Amino acid sequence: MGRIVGLSAAARRAAELPSNVRRQAGQGISQHGKPVRVFVADSSALECQLMVRGLQESGKLIKVVGYTTESAEIPKQLSKGFPRVAIISADLEDGRSTGLQVVRHVRDSSPHVRIIVLVDSPHRAMVVEAFRVGADGVFSRLEPFEMLCKCIHAVSDGQIWANSDEMRFVIEAMNQSEARSIRNASGTRLLTKREEELVQLVAEGLTNRDISHQLSLTEHTVRNYMFRIFNKLGTSNRLELALYVLNQRGEDRGSVFGGRLLAQPKPTLNSIRADAKPEISHRTTSA
């Protein structure tokens, strides 16, 4: 299934981008030709070591600057290694969903770090919660390891990593969440009443043409409204808008994870296990 990614800043100035924009992530080369600095947090030291080895030996201009298995260590290590991308497993050594719990803190404390949430399988509840707490991408262990390298470079370049099903989960969750005014930290409304009306229609899946018909506006006027909304919220397309609204509504009502999900087999990331020798090391280390 093709990936849907948000376009980089230089290419995403149009007021409306189709919700099914498809684009392959970078071919292993960052925008500036330099290795992407990556931090890894997984559920065990062995899992971390296998991923670190796979990324370092991928030949895709990726440099791992550290890893950990414990949620409390993540903020500390991020402040030391200065990574561009953090791969954080939803489940860590200190409990299920602890990775998700720390993502929101990382988003607030290290806004420059792009976050990929690693999940056992892309269940709807897990995907929605990952994006709700601030992930820039969700990657399933069921996917080929090579795609993880592409995911890293795409997210590093400012793109959103989500396939069509995951995007649908987010849009549906946004539509099902309680509509309310979008406000900044001081409580000031960021959008006009008309702009908020458009945001809700976008959440319902309407295109610019649909919105123009429903509100008796020209498509040009709708595009102008969307452009202003994107600028006010710091988003660039409908997917980013959906993630922004979903995240804010989740903060307003308190994010509740939708149940405990059973772990699925991990054949693709674990396929490198056969060639790896077990190693004993500290749970937290820097490369």
Image (cartoon, grey):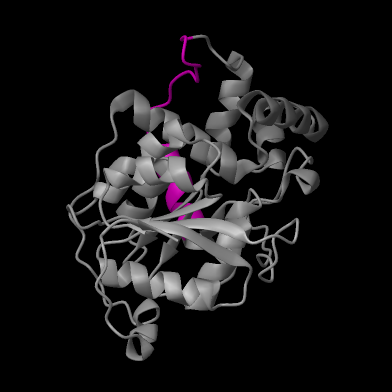
Magenta range: 166-187
186 in magenta: yes
Residue 19's x, y, as percent? 63, 52
Q: Is residue 206 visible?
A: no
Residue 2 position, x and y percent, is: 59, 70
Query: Which residue: 66% across, 42% down?
Result: 237
Residue 261 at x, y percent in the picture? 21, 60
Closest to the observer, 125 or 118: 118
Give the residue furthest to the right.
220
Residue 15, placed above or below residue 40: above
Whether residue 119 is visible: yes
The quadrant holding residue 33 is bottom right
Q: Is residue 40 left or right of residue 233?
A: left
Q: Does residue 113 lie above or below 186 as drawn?
A: below
Question: Residue at horizontal 62%, vertical 22%?
Answer: 195
Residue, x 74% and y 43% (percent of image)?
A: 9
Residue 216 location, x and y as percent? 72, 26
Q: Where does the C terminus fall, quadrant-wise?
A: bottom left
Q: Quadrant of residue 227?
A: top right
Considering every residue shown, the one lying at the far bottom of the view is 274
Can you say whether 5 is above or below 209 in the image? below
248 vs 61: above or below:
above
Query: Is 136 positioned to the left or the right of 274 in the image?
Result: right
Query: Would residue 69 appear left or right of 66 to someone viewing this image?
Result: left
Viewer-closest of 144 and 206: 144
Q: Residue at x 56, y 39 (%)?
A: 112
Q: Quadrant of the N terminus?
A: bottom right
